[in-house]
Image (tube, grey):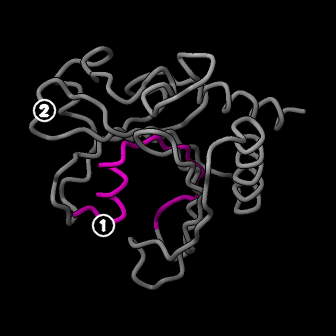
Amino acid sequence: MIKKFFITTIILVLSFTKSYSETITDFEIERFSIGQSLLKTFSKQEIMNFFNYDNLPSSMKFRIAEIYNQKEIDMEIYEAMQFYYKPEDENFILHGLNGFFFCKSKDYCSNMFKQILSDLKDSYPNYSFYEWEDMHPDDRSGESIVKGVTFNISGGSIIVRFNDWSDKMKYRDNVGVEINTKEVSSWIRNNFF
């Protein structure tokens, strides 16, 4: 009962501003959507102080900023969020966002991933999608697996992802729901270049 409520809440958080969404900008996660300015919620100083991945190899076409529940903002569902914006954009317009939560166990993550996918497929049967699985690029041993399903939406995609980290890695397994423009999706597919 609690698990079903949790999944239903996740689907509701991945909500629409219209009764039927036509473009990627119509979706929201935790009150954020593509095309929205982060300045609507945060000050420039707060945004610049968010954890980021600037130190990792990248073209820096986009900056990935990360925030945590009850640290930078109170979230309803997710434990953390990532925002994708262009570093030179002083308006901090969102081109992608990712809400995710950490799992108690691999089985818990796997079950949550399957349930979210099932609910999305049932809720949005008209959107095409494809399933994929690969070694996580941040684990050179090849033992960490990322699997997901990408739903194609006008102007971008919704991705449900399960990061199954090797025990050798310092990261925790997590499941996330990500909304990206086509430009961000292409940048990620090209290993952030």
SS for tag 2?
loop
In the rendered image, the quadrant that contains the N terminus is: top right
- Mark 1 and mark 2: span between their CA atoms? 22 Å
Label 1 secondary element: loop
Residues tagged 1 and 2 counted as in contact (Cβ below 8 A): no
- In this rendering, the answer to whether 97 lies above or below 56 is above
Question: Seen in the image, is 103 located left or right of residue 150?
Answer: right
**Image mark for residue 190:** 1
Residue 180 falls inside the magenta stretch: yes
Residue beneath the point at 63% across and 17% down: 19
Q: How many marks?
A: 2
Instruction: Residue 75 in the image: state x and y as whole percent.
Output: 52, 24
The picture places residue 12, in percent across and down from the top left corner, at: 66, 25
In which quadrant is the C terminus drawn? bottom left
Q: In the figure, residue 67 lies in which quadrant?
A: top left
**In the image: residue 2, left or right of residue 36:** right
Q: Which mark is residue 34?
A: none
Return the x and y of residue 151 as percentages of the image width and height.
57, 49
Q: Position of residue 28 (x, y in %)?
A: 50, 26
Residue at image position (58%, 50%) is 160
Q: What residue type is labelled 1?
A: Asn
* Residue count near mark 1 (Cα–Cα under 10 Å), binned few <14, some 14–19, many ≥20: few
> At label 2, which amino acid type do we have?
Asp
Q: Is residue 188 above or below residue 160?
A: below
Q: Nearer the viewer, residue 69 or 21?
A: 21
Q: Which picture quadrant has residue 111? A: bottom right
Residue 89: mark in rendering: 2
- Residues in magenta, as a range: 170-193
Q: Residue furthest right?
A: 1
